[in-house]
Amino acid sequence: MVQKILRTSLKILFGIFLFYLISGFVIIPLALTWAIPSQGTKVLKHPVHLRSVGFNPFLLKLTMNGFEVLDDQGQVMIGFDKLSVEVSFIDLLKKIYHVKAFELDALKVNAELLSGNKVNLLELVPPTAQPTKSSQPATVVNKTMPLPVIIIDAIDLHQAQVHFTDKTITPHFSTTVSAMELHITNVTTDPQAQAKIKFQADLDEKGKISMETVLKPLAQPLDVETTFSLNGYALDVLTPYVGKYTGHELKDGKLDLTMDYRISDNKLTASHQFLIQRFEFGKSVESKDALHLPFGLAVALLEDAQGKINIALPASGDMSDPKFQYTHLILQVARNFFLNLVTKPFSFLASSLGTSGQGTDELGYVRFVPGKAVLSDSQKRKLVTLIKGLKAHPKLHLEIDGSYDPKADWKEIQADTFTKDYEALRKESDRSEGKVYQLLYQRRFGIRALWALAKKYKEGVGNYKDELLDREIKRQLIEDAPADLNALSILAQARAQSVHDFFIDHGFAAQRLSLGRPQSTQSSMGYVPLPFTLTVFDDKQP
C-alpha cells in the first residue's frame, strides 16, 4: 500500500515537473511570442514585431529576441535584438525580488521632434484616463508602506543606438548616439546602498561620451557624485541650430566638455568646463529667428592666441529651497556669463588677465587732463595691460575714439591762450597787470564793452575796484568765449593719436588699430575720458 502511494506521488510529482518544463520551455515562450505583438499593437497603435521568446524555468531566465515597434512608414521607432532577465528563484521564495542580471543588446531608438514640438515616441504612450468625480470625500490613508526588498545586481546595455532628428528647423538637425555601453550595479531599495553607473558612447562618430556616477538613489536627502565628459566633438554638426540663432553657418570647431556634479545634504555644487578649438563661422544664412547679438565679437573675446576657447561655469544652489529649479539655475549662470561678455567686453578682457577692475570697464578708456593730450603714467600703465590683453586675443580690433569735453576742455584751452597772450603782451610793453588785462579784453570784445564793464566797478571819479575788475575780465576772457569746435576736434585727434602712437611704440600691430571720429563727451572727476571700441579684426582687409 505504501509503495503504491509512493509510486502515485512520484508520478504526480513527475507530471508536475514535466508540466513545469513544458510550460517553461514551450508554452510560455509560444504564448508570449504571440501575445506581445498582438496586444502591443492594440495598446501602442503601432505595429509590434517579436521574433522569439525563450524561458528557462530552472534559472528563471527570460529572453526576448528581435523586438520592434514600427511607425506608419514601417521604420523602427524603438526595438532591440535581445533582452535577457535572470531572477533568483531561491530569493523569490524569501520574498526578495532579486534580479541577478538584466541585459539589453542592440537597443535602437529613433526619436523625432515634429512640428508643434511633438515627439514621435509620445505616440506610444497611452492617454491617461481622467479620474471620475465622486460626491463622496476621499479617504486619506496616512500609512507609510514599507518598500519591498528589491535587489538588482547588474543592468547592462550593449551596443545601443539613439538617433534624433529635429524636423522643426531647416535644414533638419540629426544626431546619433551609437556604440552605447551602460553598466549599472547594486541597485536596491536599501536607502544606504550605493549604486554605480558607467556609461560610454560615440556621438555622431565625431565625439566620445563618458560618464561615471556614484549615488544613493533612495537616500534622503539625495547623495550623488557624477562626472560627464564629451571629447573631440565636431561642432559643424550643429550648423542648423547655429544658423537659426546666429544667421551664420558653423564652418569648423571642436568641443571638449567636462561636467562635475556633487549633491550632498541638499546642496548642489557643479562645474562646467568647455574647451572649444578652431571655432569659425561660415557664410551668412537667412533666418527669421537670428538674434542680433555680436557673436563674432564674443568669439574673438573668448579665443586665445592658440585659437582655444576655455569657459568655466560654476554653479551652486540649495535644493531644499522650494524655489530651486536646476534648469533655471544653469540658464541664469549661462545668461549672466554671456550678458557680461557682450555688454562689458573690456571688463571680461580684464578678468581674463586677472585684473577685473572691480567689475567695471576700466580698460575701456583712458583719461586726460582737460585741455591736454599727454598720457599720464597711470594711464600708460593701463594701456600696457590693455595691449597685453589684446595680444592674447588676436581676433580683436581696437578703435580709438578721440574725445573732448566742450566745457572743461575749452575752459583750459582758453586759460592757456589767455596766459600766452598775457605773457606776450607784457613782454611788448611796460603796462601793469591790470592794464594788460584791459587791453586783452578790448581786443576781444571792443572798447565799448570794456567801458560798460568798468562802469560796474567804478567807486568814484577816476577810482575803480581794480582787483575785482581784473578778476572779472580774466573770468570772461576764459569762460565766456564761445567754444571753437575746430580747436576741440584738433585736441581730440591729438589725444587719439597719442594713444595710437603708444600702441605702436609697444609693438602692437597697426592693422589692428583705427582712429574713430572725434566725439563730444563729459568729464568725470576732473578728467576727460577717451573711450575705446572693440570689434572683430578682419585680416582679409588690405
Image (cartoon, rainbow, N blue to C red):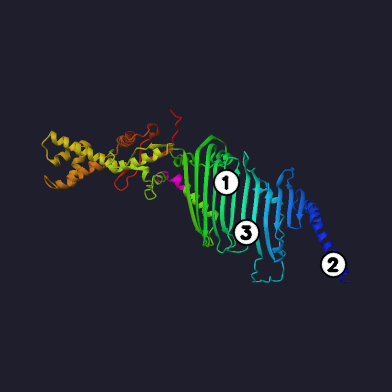
CA–CA distance in space, label 1 to label 2: 60 Å
Q: Is residue 480 left or right of residue 121?
A: left
> Closer to us: mark 2 or mark 3?
2
Q: Which residue is mark 2?
A: 9
Farthest top residue in view: 542
CA–CA distance in space, label 1 to label 3: 23 Å
Where is residue 221? Give x, y as percent. 55, 63
Specify whether residue 447 is in view.
Answer: no
Q: Is residue 272 left or right of residue 89?
A: left
For label 1, the SS is strand
Q: Which residue is mark 1?
A: 209
Q: Which residues are magenta?
A: 339-347
* Residue 251 figure quarter: top right
For label 2, the SS is helix
Q: Residue at x 16, y 37 (%)?
A: 423
Specify whether residue 64 is in view.
Answer: yes
Label 3 sits on what residue type? Val
